[in-house]
Structure formats: structure tokens, C-alpha cells
Image (cartoon, rainbow, N blue to C red):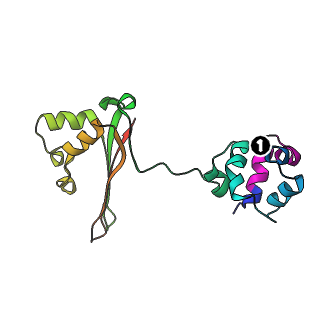
Amino acid sequence: METLGKRISNLRREKGLKQEDLANSMNVSPQAVSKWENDLSCPDITALPQLAALLGVSTDVLLSGEAAREPDVKQLPEGKRPDLEKLVVRIVVDSSDGDKVRINLPMMLVKAAMDMGMQMPQISGNDSLKNIDFSQILDLASQGVLGNLVEVESSDGDVVRIFVEEI
């Protein structure tokens, strides 16, 4: 596992900075930077945003080595919403007895089916989708809602996930 000190050292080197350069930018001694990089001490918590900015990463990346996860669901503002033609509904069903179902439906197909009054199990042939309100999913997508919209785990251990993505 990469330590905070090792991460600081690696990021500093990637930026082409010497310990002295980083120390001057942070208003600390080169010895302080050396102690950080050798995990003998840690930067003051109030200095982390400045340190992260100097190293060109977020504080999440600086502290954990991993970028912050995007939220499971996001709503795009009206001017940034993709057209329905650029969206797909992905359905993942993993049954407790090992069956796996993966369905990828272009949103325009869902819209056409809803406009014709079709029920989605008619399209997919899978009864596990019969209780899903695809008109609500279409409505959410039209409002710019993308991401993991539904995740259900039944008492039998079956898992159903439905998400909308831009293609």
C-alpha cells in the first residue's frame, strides 16, 4: 500500500519539483518535506489543499491515492442534457442461482415502446422486469437524470440494477 509520504514524493517528482522547491512553495523547511516523504510526520491538515494544488491533484487523490467516486446518480442541467438518442438503459439481473441477464436498450427504443403502449417484458421476454416502470425511467432520463437509478436485492439474493448512461 502506498503511504501518504510515498505519494507526496512520487507526485512531487512527476511535477519535476525538488524537495526545496516544494518547501519554498509551502513556506516550510526542506526538512519538513523530507519528513513527510519518509512518513516521519504529516503535513498540517490546513496545508493539504495547497499541497494538493501544487502537486496537481485533488485532496482525495493526495490522501487516498484514489479519485473521489462520482455520485451514483446525477442530474444534468437543462443545457447540458444529452438527447435521448445518445442514452441507453442498462439492466443487469444476477439471480441467486447463477443466471445473469444483461440488457442494453437504446432510450429511443424504450420511448418508442412506451409510445406504442408496449410493456417491457414483451420486448425483453424476461418476467423479472414486469414490475419496473419504464415510463418513469424515460421521464427521469428526459429530465437529465443519469446513473444508477434502481438497485434491488431480493430476499432470495437476486440483484437487479437499472442505470441510464450516455453512449
Q: Where, quadrant-wise, is the N terminus in this rendering?
A: bottom right
Examine the rendering and report whether any part of residue 106 can be seen.
no
* Residue 21 in picture, x, y percent from top left: 85, 43
Q: Which residues are magenta?
A: 7-22
Examine the rendering and report whether any part of residue 5 can be seen.
yes
13 inside magenta stretch: yes
Q: Is residue 5 above or below residue 125?
A: below
Q: Element under label 1?
A: helix
Tell me what residue is drawn at x 36 percent, y 32 percent: 81
- The residue type indicated by label 1 comes to Glu
14 inside magenta stretch: yes
Tell me what residue is drawn at x 84 percent, y 60 percent: 35
Return the residue nearer the eye: 165 or 36. Answer: 36
Name the residue at the bottom extreme. 155
Q: Is residue 139 above or below residue 29?
A: above
**Quarter of the figure with residue 101:** bottom left
Tell me what residue is drawn at x 27 percent, y 71 percent: 156
**Quarter of the figure with residue 75:** top left
* Residue 20 in picture, x, y percent from top left: 88, 46
Q: Is residue 118 left or right of residue 150?
A: left
* Residue 49 in picture, x, y percent from top left: 67, 49
Main SS of the magenta part reads: helix
Q: Where, quadrant-wise, is the C terminus in this rendering?
A: top left
**Quarter of the figure with residue 127:** bottom left
Q: Is residue 125 left or right of residue 57?
A: left
Q: Is residue 31 left or right of residue 53?
A: right
* Residue 146 in picture, x, y percent from top left: 36, 42
Residue identifier under label 1: 14
Return the residue nearer the eye: 116 or 94. Answer: 116
Q: Is residue 160 left or right of residue 21?
A: left
Tell me what residue is drawn at x 38 percent, y 28 percent: 79
